[in-house]
Image: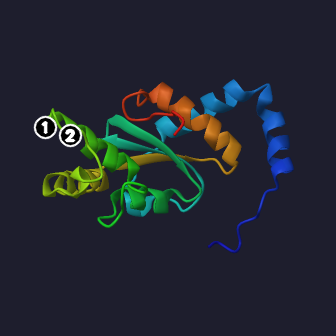
Amino acid sequence: MNRNKKTVQPEDKLCQIAEFEKGLCEFFEKKMSELTNSELFTIEQLPTSAGIYVIFENDVTPLYVGRSGNIRVRVQEHTRPSSGSGTATFAYMLAKREFSSKFKNTKLNKENEKTPEFVKMFLDKKNFLKACKFRFVEIENDILQTMFEPYAAYKLGTYPDNNTFENH
């Protein structure tokens, strides 16, 4: 835990939002420009700060937009061999899609998740993501992160295929 991190109170966050309310489009456009014009990073180069990250395939194609209070740790969770479906969510989704495609008449359930075929697909997807490159933009305010994530997914074309914002 970062003991030097300043805790921002909810009422202060709301004041920050109010400041941006009229200029929210400009804020989003500025952050999108920062995001799309930044260099590509490996996992090890990612910051431990809060913000939005994008996973890129072949350094060109945006695959997934995520948000986190610690970008590097979150991306590591997506790629760690020991991560499960709850932490390696994007790798899990990719493996589930591949499994469903390969075994057309088989619905993925808890039992199928334990099959050697699915376990291998899941690990392969984590390794695939580990080899990808990433872009990020720092946004400390969690409300603005929450608002910006679907906007970025929409603008980058990762929604609806790889980013979904449905209620669970």
In this image, 96 relative to 90: left or right?
Answer: left
In this image, 132 relative to 106: left or right?
Answer: right
Tell me what residue is drawn at x 59 percent, y 57 percent.
69
In which image quadrant can residue 115 be found?
A: bottom left
Tell me the residue that label 1 is attached to.
102
Tell me what residue is drawn at x 40 percent, y 39 percent.
64
Provide residue 96's location: percent of width, then percent of height.
27, 43
Give the vertical position of 113 relative to 21 (above or below).
below
Quarter of the N terminus within the rendering: bottom right
Provide residue 46's location: percent of width, then percent of height.
46, 58
Tell me whether circle 2 and circle 1 mark residues in contact (CB < 8 Å).
yes
Provide residue 155's location: percent of width, then percent of height.
49, 26
Instruction: Give, as a three-letter code, the residue at label 1.
Output: Lys
Tell me the residue that label 2 is attached to.
98
Q: Secondary structure at mark 1?
A: helix
Observer-nearest residue: 30 or 16? Answer: 16
Give the vertical position of 51 relative to 76 (above or below).
above
Tell me what residue is drawn at x 76 percent, y 64 percent.
6
Provide residue 65's location: percent of width, then percent of height.
46, 40
